[in-house]
Amino acid sequence: MIIFINKQSYKGIMKYIQRITIIKLRKPVQKNINQELQWLGSSLGLFNLRDKDKSCFRVFIELVKSAKQNRPLSSDELAYKLSLSRGTIIHHIHKLLESGIVIHTADGYILRVNNLQELIDEVEKDMLRTCNELKKMAKEIDNGLGF
């Protein structure tokens, strides 16, 4: 498992900007769109064993569908469509926002790009930017320590 946490300092206090998690999992053996979507989301660290009713997965799927139509969904719409409480929806939306998978617009929530391949490309760019920032800081620390 690889976890990149991009933080921003504000008056000396570290604040999360984005949390990127990549988990290497075995791909599904059978060609099944639901299993493949579950594998993709799990590989991005979006779903966990505590989510017994797969509510985060269901929120993710609705957002994938809405991205295809380029139509943001409000938390109330998601709650209604999925028969979940608004609190449950907000909990999962925060996780998706924190991971950089979803963005908030004036009209609601939507995937940050229009399809899953672009989404993975964006996550890859986020990881590379974070690694480059880490390398730069490590070099500065090494220089400060006389390495």
Image: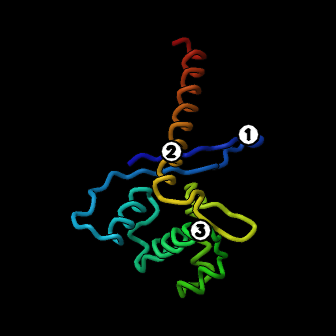
In this image, 19 relative to 106: left or right? Answer: left
Which quadrant would residue 13 be assigned to in this image?
A: top right
Q: Secondary structure at mark 2?
A: strand
Would you place residue 37 above or below residue 10 in this image? below
Task: Work out whether mark 1 precedes mark 3 in sequence or the reverse, and give the earlier one.
Answer: 1
- Residue under label 1: 12
The alpha-carbon separation of the residues under discs 2 and 3 comes to: 19 Å
Q: Give me the residue at 63% from left, 49% from top.
A: 16
Q: Give me the residue at 75% from left, 67% from top.
A: 106
Q: Along the line of sight, which residue is nearer the eye, 89 or 28? A: 28
Q: Give me the residue at 47% from left, 58% from top.
A: 116
Q: Amino acid at mark 3?
A: Ile
Task: Give neighbour class at mark 2: few <14, some 14-19, many 20+ (Cα, 10 Å).
Answer: some
Could you say which disc has been placed on residue 4 in the image?
2
Could you say which disc has been placed on residue 93 in the image?
3
Task: Work out whether mark 2 precedes mark 3 in sequence or the reverse, and give the earlier one.
Answer: 2
Q: Secondary structure at mark 3?
A: helix
Would you place residue 142 above or below residue 65 in this image? above
In this image, 100 relative to 29: left or right? Answer: right
Could you say which disc has been placed on residue 27 in the image?
none
Task: Give neighbour class at mark 1: few <14, some 14-19, many 20+ (Cα, 10 Å).
Answer: few
For this orientation, the residue located farthest to the top is 146
Asked whether the beta carbons under mark 2 and mark 3 sit within 8 Å of each other, the answer is: no
